[in-house]
Amino acid sequence: MSRTLTFEIFRYNPMDPDSKPHMQTYELDEYDSMTLFIALNRIREEQDPTLQFDFCCRAGICGACAMVINGRPGLACTTQTVKLPKKITLHPLPVFKLIGDLSVDTGTWFQNVNEKIESWIHTQKEFDPKAIEERMENALANEIFELDRCIQCGCCIAACGTARMREDFLGAYSINRLARFYIDPRDERSDQEFYDIIGSDQGVFGCLGLLGCEDVCPKEIPLIDQLGMMRRKMALRSLRQGKCS
Ligand code: SF4
Ligand code: FES
Protein backbone atom coordinates (compact mmCIF):
# COMPACT_ATOMS: atom_id res chain seq x y z
CA MET A 1 0.00 0.00 0.00
CA SER A 2 1.42 3.40 -0.89
CA ARG A 3 2.37 5.70 1.98
CA THR A 4 2.07 9.41 2.49
CA LEU A 5 5.55 10.65 3.36
CA THR A 6 6.18 13.56 5.69
CA PHE A 7 9.31 15.56 4.93
CA GLU A 8 10.85 17.80 7.57
CA ILE A 9 13.30 19.97 5.64
CA PHE A 10 15.79 22.50 6.96
CA ARG A 11 15.13 25.95 5.54
CA TYR A 12 17.44 28.95 5.74
CA ASN A 13 18.70 31.48 3.26
CA PRO A 14 21.90 33.09 4.61
CA MET A 15 21.64 35.79 1.91
CA ASP A 16 18.30 36.99 3.24
CA PRO A 17 18.57 39.02 6.47
CA ASP A 18 14.93 38.18 7.30
CA SER A 19 15.47 34.44 6.98
CA LYS A 20 15.69 32.37 10.19
CA PRO A 21 16.77 28.71 10.33
CA HIS A 22 13.72 26.48 10.77
CA MET A 23 12.25 23.16 9.70
CA GLN A 24 9.43 23.11 7.16
CA THR A 25 6.99 20.24 6.66
CA TYR A 26 5.81 18.88 3.31
CA GLU A 27 3.69 15.83 2.51
CA LEU A 28 3.95 13.70 -0.60
CA ASP A 29 2.40 10.43 -1.79
CA GLU A 30 5.07 7.81 -2.33
CA TYR A 31 5.23 5.54 -5.35
CA ASP A 32 7.41 2.53 -6.22
CA SER A 33 11.07 3.28 -6.82
CA MET A 34 10.72 6.91 -5.70
CA THR A 35 14.10 8.40 -4.77
CA LEU A 36 14.77 11.48 -2.67
CA PHE A 37 15.80 13.19 -5.91
CA ILE A 38 12.32 12.59 -7.34
CA ALA A 39 10.61 13.54 -4.08
CA LEU A 40 12.49 16.83 -3.73
CA ASN A 41 11.87 17.78 -7.34
CA ARG A 42 8.16 17.06 -6.94
CA ILE A 43 8.02 19.16 -3.78
CA ARG A 44 9.75 22.01 -5.61
CA GLU A 45 7.56 21.71 -8.71
CA GLU A 46 4.23 21.16 -6.96
CA GLN A 47 4.50 22.82 -3.56
CA ASP A 48 7.43 25.18 -3.06
CA PRO A 49 9.56 26.63 -5.89
CA THR A 50 11.86 28.34 -3.36
CA LEU A 51 13.33 25.10 -2.00
CA GLN A 52 17.09 24.92 -2.68
CA PHE A 53 19.02 21.67 -3.21
CA ASP A 54 21.67 20.38 -5.64
CA PHE A 55 21.64 17.60 -8.21
CA CYS A 56 23.55 17.01 -11.38
CA CYS A 57 24.02 13.42 -12.55
CA ARG A 58 21.13 11.70 -10.69
CA ALA A 59 23.23 8.51 -10.78
CA GLY A 60 25.58 8.59 -7.80
CA ILE A 61 28.47 9.94 -9.89
CA CYS A 62 28.82 13.70 -9.33
CA GLY A 63 28.44 13.87 -5.54
CA ALA A 64 26.35 17.06 -5.71
CA CYS A 65 23.26 15.73 -3.93
CA ALA A 66 24.85 14.73 -0.61
CA MET A 67 22.77 15.77 2.40
CA VAL A 68 21.98 14.54 5.89
CA ILE A 69 19.12 12.05 5.57
CA ASN A 70 17.51 11.15 8.90
CA GLY A 71 20.73 12.10 10.67
CA ARG A 72 23.11 10.29 8.33
CA PRO A 73 25.06 11.78 5.38
CA GLY A 74 24.16 10.16 2.07
CA LEU A 75 23.30 10.74 -1.59
CA ALA A 76 19.72 11.82 -2.24
CA CYS A 77 19.69 10.56 -5.83
CA THR A 78 20.48 6.96 -4.92
CA THR A 79 18.36 6.81 -1.75
CA GLN A 80 14.98 5.18 -2.30
CA THR A 81 12.24 6.45 -0.04
CA VAL A 82 10.99 2.88 0.47
CA LYS A 83 14.14 2.22 2.54
CA LEU A 84 13.24 5.09 4.90
CA PRO A 85 10.51 5.50 7.50
CA LYS A 86 7.41 7.57 6.68
CA LYS A 87 8.92 10.65 8.31
CA ILE A 88 12.05 11.85 6.53
CA THR A 89 14.21 14.62 7.95
CA LEU A 90 16.67 16.40 5.66
CA HIS A 91 19.48 18.77 6.66
CA PRO A 92 22.39 20.24 4.66
CA LEU A 93 25.85 18.71 5.16
CA PRO A 94 27.64 20.32 8.11
CA VAL A 95 31.27 21.59 7.81
CA PHE A 96 30.67 23.07 4.32
CA LYS A 97 29.47 26.61 3.69
CA LEU A 98 25.69 26.79 3.45
CA ILE A 99 24.32 28.27 0.23
CA GLY A 100 20.69 27.83 1.22
CA ASP A 101 18.34 25.11 2.57
CA LEU A 102 19.95 21.78 1.52
CA SER A 103 22.53 23.28 -0.81
CA VAL A 104 26.15 23.61 0.38
CA ASP A 105 29.39 24.73 -1.28
CA THR A 106 31.54 21.59 -1.30
CA GLY A 107 33.50 22.85 -4.35
CA THR A 108 35.45 25.54 -2.51
CA TRP A 109 36.30 23.14 0.35
CA PHE A 110 37.58 20.48 -2.06
CA GLN A 111 39.52 22.98 -4.14
CA ASN A 112 41.27 24.36 -1.06
CA VAL A 113 42.11 20.93 0.26
CA ASN A 114 43.29 19.65 -3.13
CA GLU A 115 45.68 22.59 -3.34
CA LYS A 116 46.88 21.97 0.22
CA ILE A 117 47.63 18.29 -0.36
CA GLU A 118 48.88 18.89 -3.93
CA SER A 119 46.43 16.42 -5.32
CA TRP A 120 48.16 15.60 -8.58
CA ILE A 121 50.95 13.32 -9.80
CA HIS A 122 54.35 14.88 -9.12
CA THR A 123 56.90 13.92 -11.75
CA GLN A 124 60.00 15.40 -13.33
CA LYS A 125 59.21 13.70 -16.64
CA GLU A 126 58.42 16.01 -19.54
CA PHE A 127 54.84 15.72 -20.72
CA ASP A 128 54.71 14.26 -24.21
CA PRO A 129 51.15 14.19 -25.61
CA LYS A 130 52.23 11.65 -28.26
CA ALA A 131 53.81 9.20 -25.81
CA ILE A 132 52.11 5.88 -25.15
CA GLU A 133 51.05 5.55 -21.54
CA GLU A 134 53.46 3.41 -19.53
CA ARG A 135 52.20 -0.05 -18.67
CA MET A 136 51.29 -0.86 -15.11
CA GLU A 137 50.51 -4.23 -13.52
CA ASN A 138 46.74 -4.85 -13.63
CA ALA A 139 46.60 -5.53 -9.89
CA LEU A 140 48.23 -2.18 -9.10
CA ALA A 141 46.07 -0.31 -11.63
CA ASN A 142 42.99 -1.81 -9.95
CA GLU A 143 44.28 -0.85 -6.50
CA ILE A 144 44.70 2.77 -7.64
CA PHE A 145 41.33 2.75 -9.39
CA GLU A 146 39.65 1.52 -6.20
CA LEU A 147 40.80 4.70 -4.42
CA ASP A 148 40.12 6.91 -7.44
CA ARG A 149 36.38 6.13 -7.27
CA CYS A 150 35.84 8.99 -4.82
CA ILE A 151 33.19 11.42 -6.13
CA GLN A 152 34.00 14.28 -3.72
CA CYS A 153 30.52 14.18 -2.22
CA GLY A 154 31.68 15.31 1.24
CA CYS A 155 29.77 12.65 3.20
CA CYS A 156 32.95 11.40 4.92
CA ILE A 157 33.79 14.96 6.05
CA ALA A 158 30.25 15.61 7.29
CA ALA A 159 30.35 12.39 9.33
CA CYS A 160 33.79 13.09 10.81
CA GLY A 161 33.96 14.07 14.49
CA THR A 162 37.43 15.59 14.08
CA ALA A 163 36.42 17.71 11.05
CA ARG A 164 33.52 19.06 13.12
CA MET A 165 35.95 20.11 15.86
CA ARG A 166 38.87 21.50 13.91
CA GLU A 167 38.70 23.39 10.65
CA ASP A 168 42.23 22.50 9.57
CA PHE A 169 41.68 18.72 9.64
CA LEU A 170 42.28 17.33 6.16
CA GLY A 171 39.87 14.43 6.64
CA ALA A 172 39.42 10.95 5.22
CA TYR A 173 39.06 12.32 1.69
CA SER A 174 42.60 13.76 1.73
CA ILE A 175 44.18 10.74 3.38
CA ASN A 176 42.59 8.46 0.79
CA ARG A 177 43.67 10.80 -2.00
CA LEU A 178 47.28 10.85 -0.81
CA ALA A 179 47.26 7.06 -0.30
CA ARG A 180 46.27 6.85 -3.98
CA PHE A 181 49.33 8.90 -5.03
CA TYR A 182 51.57 7.08 -2.53
CA ILE A 183 51.02 3.73 -4.26
CA ASP A 184 51.19 5.21 -7.77
CA PRO A 185 54.71 4.60 -9.17
CA ARG A 186 54.37 7.65 -11.44
CA ASP A 187 54.31 9.96 -8.42
CA GLU A 188 57.91 10.72 -7.50
CA ARG A 189 57.23 12.35 -4.12
CA SER A 190 59.41 11.04 -1.29
CA ASP A 191 58.06 9.73 2.03
CA GLN A 192 59.29 12.98 3.57
CA GLU A 193 57.18 15.02 1.14
CA PHE A 194 54.07 12.99 2.01
CA TYR A 195 54.96 13.34 5.68
CA ASP A 196 55.19 17.12 5.37
CA ILE A 197 51.58 17.17 4.15
CA ILE A 198 49.82 14.66 6.41
CA GLY A 199 52.29 13.61 9.12
CA SER A 200 50.62 15.79 11.75
CA ASP A 201 47.38 16.30 13.73
CA GLN A 202 45.94 17.96 10.64
CA GLY A 203 46.41 14.65 8.86
CA VAL A 204 46.79 11.01 9.87
CA PHE A 205 47.56 11.66 13.55
CA GLY A 206 44.46 13.84 14.12
CA CYS A 207 41.94 11.08 13.39
CA LEU A 208 40.06 9.92 16.49
CA GLY A 209 39.19 6.59 14.85
CA LEU A 210 35.42 6.99 15.12
CA LEU A 211 35.02 5.29 11.71
CA GLY A 212 32.10 7.50 10.65
CA CYS A 213 33.76 8.28 7.32
CA GLU A 214 33.84 4.70 6.04
CA ASP A 215 30.34 3.97 7.38
CA VAL A 216 28.78 6.67 5.20
CA CYS A 217 30.96 6.63 2.06
CA PRO A 218 28.48 5.92 -0.77
CA LYS A 219 31.25 4.42 -2.90
CA GLU A 220 32.33 2.07 -0.09
CA ILE A 221 35.94 3.13 -0.37
CA PRO A 222 38.06 1.38 2.31
CA LEU A 223 38.96 4.65 4.04
CA ILE A 224 40.07 3.09 7.31
CA ASP A 225 42.53 0.76 5.54
CA GLN A 226 44.05 3.81 3.84
CA LEU A 227 44.28 5.68 7.11
CA GLY A 228 45.98 2.66 8.71
CA MET A 229 48.45 2.29 5.84
CA MET A 230 49.37 5.99 5.71
CA ARG A 231 49.54 6.27 9.49
CA ARG A 232 52.01 3.35 9.69
CA LYS A 233 54.19 4.87 6.96
CA MET A 234 54.12 8.32 8.55
CA ALA A 235 54.76 6.94 12.07
CA LEU A 236 57.84 5.17 10.71
CA ARG A 237 59.05 8.47 9.27
CA SER A 238 58.43 10.14 12.66
CA LEU A 239 60.48 7.45 14.38
CA ARG A 240 63.32 7.93 11.92
CA GLN A 241 63.26 11.65 12.67
CA GLY A 242 63.18 10.94 16.42
CA LYS A 243 59.79 12.65 16.75
CA CYS A 244 58.08 9.67 18.48
CA SER A 245 59.12 8.16 21.79
FE1 SF4 B 1 32.38 10.89 -0.71
FE2 SF4 B 1 33.60 8.55 -0.09
FE3 SF4 B 1 34.90 10.43 -1.52
FE4 SF4 B 1 34.40 10.84 1.07
S1 SF4 B 1 35.74 9.24 0.21
S2 SF4 B 1 34.15 12.34 -0.56
S3 SF4 B 1 32.40 9.84 1.29
S4 SF4 B 1 33.07 9.28 -2.14
FE1 FES C 1 25.08 13.22 -8.76
FE2 FES C 1 23.47 12.46 -6.76
S1 FES C 1 23.06 13.89 -8.34
S2 FES C 1 25.54 11.93 -7.09
Image (cartoon, rainbow, N blue to C red):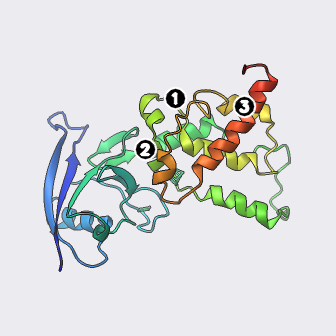
Image coordinates for residue 196, horizontal then vertical, percent: 71, 28
Q: Classify mark 2: helix, strand or loop.
A: loop
Q: Is residue 224 visible?
A: yes
Residue name at image x 82 percent, y 43 percent: 188
Image coordinates for residue 235, horizontal then vertical, percent: 72, 31
Task: Name the residue type under label 3.
Answer: Ala
Q: Report the front residue among 242 and 56.
A: 242
Q: Classify mark 1: helix, strand or loop.
A: loop
Asked if the residues shown at circle 2 and circle 1 are in contact, with their CB atoms under 8 angstroms apart, the answer is no
Query: In this rendering, which labeled residue sits more in front, label 2 or label 1?
Result: 2
| Alpha-carbon span between mark 1 and mark 3 | 20 Å
For ligand 1, tell me if the residue under mark 2 lies within 8 Å. Answer: yes
Residue name at image x 55 percent, y 43 percent: 172
Task: Name the residue type under label 2.
Answer: Ala
Image coordinates for residue 93, horizontal then vertical, percent: 36, 45
Residue 131, quarter of picture: bottom right
Query: In this rendering, which labeled residue sits more in front, label 3 or label 2?
Result: 3
Viewed as shown, does residue 186 lie left or right of 159? right
Residue 159: image tag: 2
Q: Which residue bears the numbered disc 1?
A: 168
| Crowdedness near tag 2: few (<14), some (14–19) or many (≥20) residues, C-alpha within 10 Å | many
Q: Which residue bears the numbered disc 3?
A: 235
Q: Quadrant of the image for the C terminus?
A: top right
